[in-house]
Image (spheres, rainbow, N blue to C red):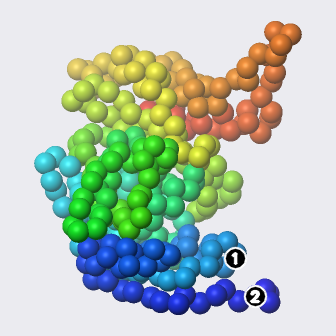
Amino acid sequence: MSTHAPQAAQAVTLPTTLDEAVTALAERPAAVPVAGGTDLMAAVNSGQLRPAALVGLGRISEIRGWQYQDGHALLGAGLTHARMGRPDFAALIPALAAAARAAGPPQIRNAGTLGGNVASAAPTGDALPVLAALEATLIIAGQGGARREIPVSHLLAGVEMLRAGELIGYVRVPLLHAPQVFLKATGRTGPGRAVASVALVLDPARRGVRCAVGAIAPMPLRPLEAEHWVAQLIDWDNNRAIVPEALAAFGEYVAAACIPDPAPAEDGSVPQLPPAVLHLRRTVAALARRALGRALS
């Protein structure tokens, strides 16, 4: 038991609209937005964060659902993992629903939100590789009703950041109406943090494959060359057929792209990967192979 209790927040604001929340953050630059609080409270309890003020997002109904918009799904940042895991949402975006169901035990799924998963940008966030594979974009709410849109990959890579007084309002996801798969490996049986995860979606209209690997790096990795290579081997006009050898080769291609061999030493010798890293690369290869096989079947 710690002898130092977490410092209580000096002010708590509970806005009912997205614009009210943005205004509250602008008025209190030190305030921290909170939705499900699964990451925030862990940081508070561990002593890593002492928020001077909180802006609660739980009463903003406009970001707790979704709508259709020009061939896309506009997902509210306040959608919980539990809500995304339901059958009606799974029919819309299967891979994201699968990631939501794998996010952790019920108490985490009931509280954790899509926007929180993106904003915290934890490498093990299950939704992140799915959003990367889907090439989703974020709609950012700013002061005075301003809205701007950025690719989710830009935020995760630090290319673009949230500005002071901004919030993630929505996530725009293209509706591909094609097979999607999310798989992850954990260090134990049952719900747990991912050791590695793979999201794979097919894009029949463009005859393309999109793949993202999560948990093994600070942000999801896209093996673009592997995607392009395997897309050329798929018979898109004949039930998306592919030879079994190509599935195994794709898995190895993805794994080698995400966890490459060490650079040669000065004497020309090639160092071996440590056993733990080699095991991780085999795990990624297996996940990628299975994901593609399930999507094509």
Callout 2: few (<14), some (14-19), or many (20+) C-alpha neighbours within 10 Å?
Answer: few
Q: Could one spot residue 181 in this view of the protein?
A: no
Task: Tell me if I can see residue 126 in this picture.
Answer: yes
- Rendered-image quadrant of the C terminus: top left
- Give the structural element (helix, strand or loop) at label 1: loop
State which tag comes first along the sequence, 1 or 2.
2
Residue nearer the viewer, 239 or 249? 249
**Residue at horizontal 20 percent and vertical 49 percent from the top:** 72
Measuring from the top left, give residue 277's x and y in whole percent. 73, 36
Q: Is residue 14 left or right of residue 110?
A: left
Q: Report how far apart the C-alphas of labels 1 and 2 lie in the structure.
A: 9 Å
What residue lies at 34% left-to-right and 41% top-to-bottom? 135
Tell me the kind of residue under disc 2.
Answer: His
Tag 1 near tag 2, CB within 8 Å: yes
- Would you name the residue on which mark 1 appears? 47
Location of residue 25 in the rendering, given as x and y in whole percent from the top left corner:
39, 75
Above/below status of 16 relative to 42: below
Name the residue: 24% across, 27% down: 206
**Numbered tag placed on residue 132 in the rendering:** none
Measured along the vertical axis of the image, is residue 205 above or below residue 105?
above
Q: Amino acid at mark 1?
A: Gly
Quarter occupied by residue 295: top left
- For image coordinates 23% across by 46% down, the residue present is 175
Query: x, y (%) of residue 134?
Result: 35, 42
Residue 4's label in the rendered image is: 2
Q: Name the spot of residue 205 as percent of width and height, x first.
A: 21, 30
Looking at the rendered image, the quarter that the N terminus falls into is bottom right
Q: Is residue 282 left or right of residue 74?
A: right
Q: Is residue 208 above or below residue 94?
A: above
Name of the residue lying farthest toward the top:
268
Q: Nearer the viewer, residue 282 or 115?
A: 115
